[in-house]
Image (spheres, rainbow, N blue to C red):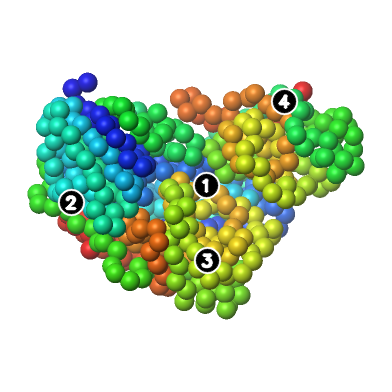
Amino acid sequence: MTRGLAVAEPGLLTTVQDLGRPGWGAWGVPAAGALDEEALRLANRLVGNPPDAAALEITLSGPVLRAIGDLELAVVGGPFGPAPGEVLPLPDGRTLALTAGPGAVRAVVAVSGGIDVPRVLGSRSTCLSARFGGFQGRRLQKGDVLAVGAPVGPRLPGRANVPRPPAGDVVLRATPGPQEDFFDPEAAAAFWRGTYRILPESNRMGIRLAGESLGFVETAALPSEGTAMGAVQITAEGQPIVLLAERPTTGGYPKIATVAAADLGLLARTAPGRAVRFERIGFDEALRLLLEREGDVRAGSAR
Amino acid sequence: MKRTGERAWLLEWSGDESEANAKARAAAAALRASNAPGLLDAVPAARTVLVLGGPLFDPAVLPALEADPPASAPGPVPRRHEIRFAPDGADRDEIASRCGLSPEAFVRAFTGLTFTVGFLGFSPGFAYLYGLPLAFHLPRRPSPRASVPAGSVALAGPYAGIYPGSTPGGWNILGTSSQRLFDLRGDPPFLFSPGDTVRFAL
C-alpha cells in the first residue's frame, strides 16, 4: 500500500463516512453518512478532495493515526487534535493523536485523496446497525490499515470554521412536524417552550433528549411512515429523539417537529449533558438558512 | 400533503390500509421512474410516500400525484417468491391458540395465503407483508425480545415478515427460514421489492 492510514488507537467510535447513500429507503436501507455534513464538505475541501470523498467521523475520544506515505489531513467539527480547521501535513511514518479538546463531541478527519474503501450501494459510508459499508462494516479497531487514494484537487487556502455550540442553551431551529396536531395544544406548546438535556445514550441513529414529558403517547393508531433526517420523534414516554443518519427508514412514532438541516451540524457538535431548545420557524425560512449555509460551505466557512 | 423538513414531503392516502399502500407503492415507483431532477428518494410505507429532494427538486409535481396516483406501479414486473420455512418458532403454539386453531391447522392456513410486499423498513431487507386475514391479526408482544434470531418468520398486526438479521423485535415468531434476504454484492441486492408476492411453504 503506497498511501494509507494505520490505526494505532481507534478512539471511542471512529467510522468511515461520506455523504451517505440516499435512494435505498424503499428497501429499508438507512442513508448513513457523516452526521456533520458541513464539516465533511469543508474538511474535504481543505485537503483538495471532492465533497463526497470518504473521511473518518470521530467521536468523543479521537484516534491515533499513523501515515503510510506523505499525507495531509484536516479535522473539522469539534476541537480535536493540534490544529482543528487547518491542513495538517502528516509525513510517512509520523503519528498524529487526535486528542479531544474542551467540549469536543464529533469531528470529520479528511485525508488528501480520501479513504479508499469499496462503495456499497453507491457509498463508502459505514452502516453500523446493519454492519456493512465503510471498513468491513464496523467501527475502526487498533491495527486496521485503511487505503488512501491519490490526491486530486487544489487545496482550500486558509482554514475552515464551523459554528461551535454557544454557552447556555443551544437553540435548534425547527419546522413543525407532520404529526404536530397529534398532540394536544398544551403538550405541543410545552415542547416548543421546553429545555431538553442531551442524553449519553445518543448515537448515529438519533440524539436522545430528556426533559418534561409530553405525556404518554399512544401509537396504536399510527401506521409506519418514512422518517426524515432531523425529525423529532416523541417516544411512548413523551421524550424527544432527533432522528439522524442511521435512523430506521420507517417508524410509527409521532413526529412533532423537524430540526432545520442548517442546524444539524451544530447539534452533532453539541455534547451530551448540554441543554437544547427548539425555535419554531417556517419551511421557507428553513430553506433560506440551508441555502445560506451551502453558500458559506462553498466560500470555505460556515457561520 | 404534509411536510417533514424543508426538503421532505409526505404524500398520504386514507381508507383501507392495503389499498392505500398500493397507491403509495405506485406513486413512489412513478416518481422514481420520472427521474425528476434533484429527487433523492421516494420511500413508500403503510399509507404514505416520503419524498426526499435536494435543492434542485421541484415539489410542484407532488399534489397531482397524491390526488391521482397511477393505477399500477411502473418499473420492473413484480416477482413471485416461495419461501421455505420450518414452523419451529417460540410463539407458534400461542399464535395458533390465539387464532383459535391447532398449531398444525394454523401452519396449514398460513401456507395457503398469498402475501404482497407492501413496504420495507425497520432494517435493510425487512419486508412488511400484507395478506393475513383479520382473524390472524395479533398484537405485538407486550415487551420486545432483546434479540430475535435471523430468519425468523413472524407476525404482528396486519403484517407478516422475516427478520433479515438478528435484531431486537416485538413480533410473534412462527418459524425460521434460511432464505437470504439480501446480498449487497448481488444485482438486485434485495430479494424483495415493494409489490412482489410471497408464499410460504414447508
- The disc, 1 or 3, on the residue closer to the chain's N-terminal end is 1
Q: Which numbered marker is on residue A85?
A: 2
Residue nearest the observer in this picture, A188 or B185: A188
Q: Which numbered marker is on residue B85?
A: 4
The residue located at (50%, 72%) in the rendering is A191
Q: Amino acid at mark 3?
A: Ile
**Local crowd size for mark 4, using a 10 Å CA cut-off: few (<14), some (14–19), many (≥20):** some
| Secondary structure state at the residue bearing disc 1 | loop
**Which subunit holds the residue at mark 3?**
A
Residue that sits furthest to the top in the current view: A1
| Secondary structure state at the residue bearing disc 4 | loop
Tell me, yes or no, whether the two marked residues, 4 and 3, touch with CB atoms within 8 Å.
no
Dividing the picture into quadrants, the one containing residue B96 is top right
| Secondary structure state at the residue bearing disc 2 | loop
**Local crowd size for mark 1, using a 10 Å CA cut-off: few (<14), some (14–19), many (≥20):** many
Q: Which numbered marker is on residue A248?
A: 1
Single out the mark in the foreground, 3 or 2.
Answer: 2
The residue located at (62%, 31%) in the rendering is B150
